[in-house]
Amino acid sequence: MWNRSLQIFATLPILLIAAGCVDVQSALNPAGGEAERIHTLSWILIIFCSVVFLGVAIATMIALFGSHRWRQRLAGERLVIGAGLIFPAAALSALLGYSVMIMGMAGSAEGQDGLRISVVGERWWWRVIYTARDGRRIESANELRVPIDQPVHVELTSADVIHSFWVPKLAGKLDMIPGRTNTLTLNVRGPGISRGQCAEYCGGAHALMSFFVIAMPPADFEAWLVRESQPAAVPADEAEIQGHALFVRSGCGACHTVRGTNASGTIAPDLTHVGNRHSLAAATLPNNAEAFARWISDNQHIKPENMMPPYEIYTERELAQLSAYLESLR
Amino acid sequence: MWAKLALNRLIVSLAVLLTLVAAAGAAFIWSGLYNVAASRDHFSVTTWILEKVLEQSVATQSAFIETPPLDDPDLVRLGAAHYEGGCVPCHSRPGEPINVIVSQMLPSPPHLADVAAGQPPEELYWIVKHGLKYTGMPAWPAPIRDDEVWALTAFLMELAGGEMDNYRQLAGLDRVPSGALAGTEPTHQTEAVTLTQCIRCHDDAAVSTISTLVPQLGGQSIEYLERALKEYAARVRPSGIMQPVATHLDDREIAKFADYYASLDVQPGQHVIDPARIARGRALATEGDPKNAIPRCLACHSRSRAAEFPALAGQHADYLAGQLRVWQSGGRNRTAYGQIMASIARRLTDEQMLDVAAYFASLPPEAYRNDAASASPGSE
Ligand SMILES: [Cu+2]
């Protein structure tokens, strides 16, 4: 019994360190304004609590084992009033004030102007909507691209049930509520990738509802957005042409949009530039030909209960053609 | 003290008695003296017990079944058509004597007109669905297809109604040409193999199907027809009506039937009068219902579809809605193609199923004929 608890305690620090190692999704390794403030606040709280804990532990020791003189001192009225009433009241009020100030800075401090991106929680993926320079609405999915070193307002809502948007490296979590828009402001320092996930149980495939935030220098971001606003690439080689024909015949366009073709479904991720994304199916699979093939034919095993029907109808060759087509959508 | 001794005695004698009885029973079984011959009737007391057990069991087991409306003539005709192929071999046609060989079964299959008259529909339904142990009465081959079992029940209820002088018409026997024409088409076969007389149920160049619950096959693609027949034969597409038919066919015959029906023109589908329903169905088919994650049907059921996907235009509304209900109750999802449609069918409401079925039935059959061969990038 004791041995087991000891073992568990012994592994705790290791787990904490390991969690820190998972760099893309760690609150201990902040890369954005809000996350940095949360990070500082956490450390202040941890250190403060540790000091108080130490003090209490010492006081307890004295009470138990201290000499008579020390015990007398401990029982003195001065100490009880000073350390038992005034200190906690003052310290906790100060901390409260500090944390309210820090958390209140989210959004307001960085103003309302700057880029706006909409993210809609769907079962079980993320619809991401950018506004191009010409005002057009550009849809993408499961990946958020943001310019660095400037506030980006992410407008969060949901199409079905309550989801929650959480990128530990960049900010605290914020719920996505149907019929309501919550705004989260990101301000990412330096280019890089962060991982986020749904932090509110939303049924079936909730555990596999994640995404990546890719931060890039403003100029790169602008260039990327211009490319993202273009219609899909036209299939070039034979495999891609066959793959596109299969895509049309199999009715993939019933649910998916590929801008510039007749595929105009709106109930599933936009695939216009799917080949360019960092992952597939809400960060469930990497993005490569093999993953496309596996997803198409076996998605109900890979991500149980997701809303796409499995297509177990293709030959190896047909799957390769479909994957070639999807990969070409860059 | 005395009491305790007496009790011990009693226990010992009981044990000895039980052992003796068990030994005698074992000896009787091993000796083979019991005569299992069907040629000898049971003792009248055995018969009485067996019948009583059966009667009580059926009554109890069917106590909580609710009977849907059964007076739909299409339901009765589908039931009659299957009765002809599936039940006549044992129970005979109404008014004809029981087959001599079959009549020597113990118990022998009764004429159902007499039986059905005295039995509530739930009990008939339960018997047809589950069969009867130790009697030779088989269970329904596709237990998930309650709708088909109700069609048989509807026919039995009609049978119970009295003299049935239109049986040949109900069962589609009059649709099989006789005389010079007999057997010229593969879909006629001979009267002896009624099971595979497709024309009794399905369409041909001159007539539509015998019931709106039977699909029209004319104009479907070869790929779809072959696949459907093979899936029935492999028992992965559940239907107690088509599975027995398809298991009769070999690959060559399947190819022949698929060719025949693919080249046939479609007959006009079931006439639906409700324009509001059709309009709602059209909206669903062309735009879907994104709020409820329902894609537009035409992405997969229009001209640009794969040859393996079925045509719906001009198909009977009753059949289409019936198949959607099969998916909702968990059937037809064990095949690769069935799974694709299953996830979509499950999202429809009852009203939406009726709407969209009415819309497709209202279309001229030429609408959305398949042209998979011409699918090219950017076309739909
Ligand atoms: Cu969730």
Image: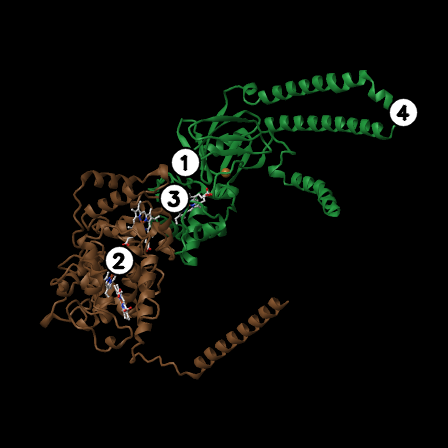
Question: At numbered mark 4, what does the secondary structure look like: helix, strand or loop?
Answer: helix
Q: Are marks 4 and 2 in contact (CB under 8 Å)?
A: no
Location of residue B373 by image quarter: bottom left
The count of marks equals: 4
Q: Are marks 2 and 1 in contact (CB under 8 Å)?
A: no
Q: Chain of mark 1?
A: A
Location of residue B91 by image quarter: bottom left
Q: Are marks 4 and 1 in contact (CB under 8 Å)?
A: no
Q: Which residue is mark 2?
A: B221
Of A69 and B104, which appears nearest the observer? B104
Task: Say which amino acid is labelled 2.
Answer: Ser
Answer left or right for B259 relative to A2: left
The chain letter corresponding to brown is B
User: Local crowd at mark 2 within 10 Å, few (<14), some, or many (≥20)?
Assistant: many
Could you tell me how far apart the alpha carbons at marks 3 and 4 are, in whole angstroms?
A: 89 Å
Q: Sequence order check: which comes first, mark 4 or mark 1?
A: 4
Please identify which colour was used for chain A in the image: green
User: Local crowd at mark 4 within 10 Å, few (<14), some, or many (≥20)?
Assistant: few
Q: Position of residue B23 (x, y in %)?
A: 49, 79
Answer left or right for A174 relative to B272: right
Outermost residue to the left: B180
Location of residue B29 by image quarter: bottom left
